[in-house]
Structure formats: structure tokens, C-alpha cells
Amino acid sequence: MKKLTFLFAALLVMAVGCNKEMNPQKGDAPEEQVFLSFKIAMPDVKSSTDSDADDSYGSSDANPDIEVGTSDENTVKSIDIILADENGEMKAEALNITQVQGVTTETYVASFSRKDIFEAADYRVYIYVNGALKYSQDAVYTIDSDNLESNIAKKDEFLMTNADDDNLITMPADMKQFTVASNPFNIGTFNVERAVARFDYKAEKADNIYTWESVTAAGAKASEIQVQLTDIALMNLSKSFYHFRRTSADGTATGWTVGGTETKTNYVVDTDWEAKANHANNDFSNNYLYYMKESEWTALADITVDDNWTPADGTVTDGYKKWRYVIENTIPSDGDDSDGNSNQINGLTTGVKFKGELQPSAAATDALKDAMEEGKQLFVFQNVMYGSWEMLENAANAEGSTEYALQAALANLNKAAGETEPTAEQLAAAGFKGFSANDEGKYEVIYTYWNRHNDNGDVATMGPMEFSVVRNNVYKLSVTKIGGFGSPADPKDPNPDPDPDPDTPDEDLNYYFQVAVKVLPWVVRVNNIEF
């Protein structure tokens, strides 16, 4: 083990007697220094939320697979170490401990003025890696849309802080032997974690093209339409986070633990917990970036940077690529023991939007191909593409047609519309979707996925922290299946009103897509999405 020594001025050190009162050392020269050695680690062990696990770090799945991160995500360039009392009040600090090669096996040595050191005293140790931040236990970091990757997710300088609450140390009763750098007092190893989460994407289908079968009253038939996914974007991104992760039983400040470990039944607390607990009375456009609006679109073809994940079973990962970094967004319980999680709604949860383009498949009729070539509006009813309005009416009114549901919808629509052309509102009320071509002749559609953090395996009930984003997790996204047409993208209004409604529950039984979740401990989570 290589050992590097660093000398620098700092503040303090401490000592308590048997009654925990601070008792300063006596008879020592104030200019003398005391040296403390420590290590930092980014644990790669099995999650502590598994009942059989005995480690103190991890998130909510027992799968031992990990992603260790790429070198630019693991580099340690500087460390600030804080000594605080049990109330979180700072008692000493050693700043900018530099070591270019600081990785998990390195030992760091910090110096403190001996006059500030208290013998036999208990302290909490707080670590900042790559972040010259002013310490306070309740300190909050706020980002904007431009400074995330230039500050806290900066290449080779990711901000990292304590990953758990295993940070209590006790100073020796006699500090005299630790006044030379070559013989520091070892205070142990401290787990740290990145302050950000990461989203990755994997192209499951060649060219991101998905085809499915539509079902009519006459039975299954080959789809005449396929979707090519083209772009991806995020929405509802938190703007603020605590310097140190904290947990509580319900996601509020009541009884929270600074650096506490996430379990299957508790909550990670974020800075907006109070507003989220009373979300009916709050406008989250000031709390979030891109509130109910997609952020800038990223072309799927441009997501090309390899990740660094090899599954525990040695299988090939087949193309997951790093996409972008975000900060955590968690949602507290509503306090109702019958569900406890109704605060997990579309207006609070971080969402991922996919943009796609409807295209005629190999099975498409010439009539449909011509309609799309001419840029005619296309219509879908009960997840079946009929083509233009004329084609839809012909399908309903053809001799011997068994499209009974379509016939009934048209009858009601015509009755409601009278002698005028149906409005968009009337079409939607009758169950029709209309897709219009943009200026480039493309029929764009939108699919929305609400990020799942801790899948409880019950599609009818949301569990604690089911829909969240938590720091130091990688959310690996892969669209495995598309079984519907998505929402029409309005070519006349690129920024429509929020859709869906912000109060819609994240886990809605009416959703036509399914999500399979594989949770891995960066910490990595693999989300296979089916639309």
C-alpha cells in the first residue's frame, strides 16, 4: 500500500472525558501538529438492503452486480475532511488534501493544529471529494441547467461525499505519539459516493425500429406501421440536493439520519420533501428544471460513450452507453398506511421521454403508403392504425365489416359533431388519436416513462421509493417492446400544455407499456421498458 503524506494548516482536534465534556490537552506547545490518516472507498459490495448482507452501504436490491464507473468518474483530485460533534457542528477542518492518484487503496494524511485537538473525544467525520464546499450539516447545493457537468459531475472531478453514517471516531487518550507525519493516528476508511445519478441507454432493436401486431375485431393482423425511436429527453429534474445523503422512515425530516443507508422500506430525503408532501398547494416550476416539459432532446444515435459494466455472471452487456447525469429526486410518503405512496405522481417524478417517427412497415398497403407520402392526417382507434379519415370510414362501412366498436364510435362522433367536421376534442372524447405530419413530412410520436428506482413487483400498488432518482445510481434504459402508438406530437405546438396531467399516479393500470427493472449496485439499475 502506497502512503502519501500531506501537510496543511487546518483547525482543530478534540477530547472528551467520561462525561463527554471537551478537555483540551495541557502543557503542549500550540504550534505542534497532530496527524490523522484515513482512506476513502467506493464500495462494490452487495446491497445492505438484502437481509443477508452485512455491509453498511448500498441501495435497494440484493443483486451483487456493480458498475465501477469509468476513470473520469472515479478520480480523486482533492479531499476536504471535516470533524464535527454529534450535533453536526464543525469542530475542525483540513482542506484541499491533494493526491492525484487518490483511489480506493490510497492512504491520506491530514494535519491539524494540536492546540485544537481534544483527547478521547468523539467526532463525526465528513468527507468532500473534489468539492471545495463550505460545510454545514444542512448545506444544500443548487444547480442550473448549465453547471451540472461543469461543477459536480465534471470529468475527473466528480463531487463525492459520505455514503453512509459509519463515520464516528474516537481520539486516543494520548496524542503525543501522533505529532509526526510518519506516524499518524489511523481513523479508518470512509465510504464515499457520487452526488449525481446517471442515465444510460441501450438500443435494443436495430436502428431503434419497433414493429408490433395490431388487433381488430377480425383478429390479429400484421401491423402496417412501425415506430423508429429517434430522440430521448428528461423532465422534472431536481435543482437542489443535500451535501450528504439522508434517510428517514417517511421521507420527511422527522428522525432523519445524515448519511443513512437506504432500505426497502425507508426513504431517501431530498431538499423539496416538505413541498412534495403538500404538492397540491405548490407550483413545482420553481423547484424543477424542465417541469412537465422535456429537456433538450438527445439523438439516440449520438449516445455513443461506452459504460464500464460487466455483469457478475460475465455476460456481455451488449451496448449500454452513457447518456447524462442528474441529481436525485425523491418523493416522501403521504402518511397513509394503506398506500403510503400516493405522492408519487407525474408532476413530481423524473420522467424520460422518447421521440419516435411513425413509418409504414413492409406490410403496409399502398393506400396507407400513399396517405403518408401525401402527408394526410392519420387516425388510430383502439390501438389500430386505419390511415386517413377516408380509410377509417371505409373500414367501418365496408360490406360485411365486423369493426363494431369502430362503427359505434363513428356513430356517436357523427351524432355529436352534426354536420361539421369533428374537432380534435370530439375525436379524443370518442377514442380517436390523430397524427399529423410536420413540415418535413414526419409523423412524430412521444412515449413517456416515469423513472423506476425500487420496483416492488406490484403493478397495482406503489411501494416506498418506487419512482425516484437517487445519487450514485446508474439507471440503464432499454426499450424492449412497443405495443402502442404513443402520444401525437403536435407539429404546430412544440411546447404543449403538460401531458399527462401532473396529478396522474406514476403506476397507472391503464398504461399500455410495462417496465421490467433489474437493480444493480456505481450502483446500477437496468430498466427494460415496454411501451
Image: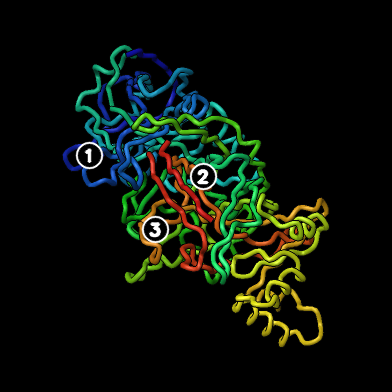
Q: For mark 2, does the 10 Å Cα neighbourhood hold few (<14), some (14 to 19), or many (20 or more) residues?
A: many
Instruction: Find the distance from the CA under tag 2 to the CA under tag 3.
Output: 29 Å
Check the picture and name the quadrant holding the C terminus.
bottom right
Q: Name which residue lies at 43% across and 67% down.
A: 342
User: Toward which corner of the image does residue 483 lie, by quadrant?
Assistant: bottom right
**Residue 513 placement (x, y as % from top left):** 51, 58
Q: Nearer the viewer, mark 2 or mark 1?
A: 2
Q: Nearer the viewer, residue 32 or 316?
A: 316
Q: Nearer the viewer, mark 2 or mark 3?
A: 2
Q: Name which residue lies at 34% across and 14% down.
A: 181
Check the picture and name the quadrant holding the N terminus.
top left
Q: Which residue is mark 1?
A: 54
Query: Vertical placement of 129 versus 103: above or below?
Result: below
Q: Nearer the viewer, residue 33 or 212?
A: 212
Examine the rendering and report whether any part of residue 364 can be seen: yes
Q: Are marks 2 and 3 in contact (CB under 8 Å)?
A: no
**Residue 57 placement (x, y as % from top left):** 32, 39
Q: Amino acid at mark 1?
A: Asp
> What SS does tag 2 mark?
strand
Total number of numbered discs in the rendering: 3
**Residue 135 placement (x, y as % from top left):** 46, 39
Examine the rendering and report whether any part of residue 92 can be seen: no
Instruction: Find the distance from the CA under tag 2 to the CA under tag 1.
Output: 32 Å
Q: Which residue is mark 3?
A: 251
Q: Which residue is mark 2?
A: 478
User: Toward which corner of the image does residue 285 lie, by quadrant?
Assistant: bottom right
Q: Name which residue lies at 52% across and 51% down.
A: 481
Query: Vertical placement of 284 versus 131: above or below?
Result: below
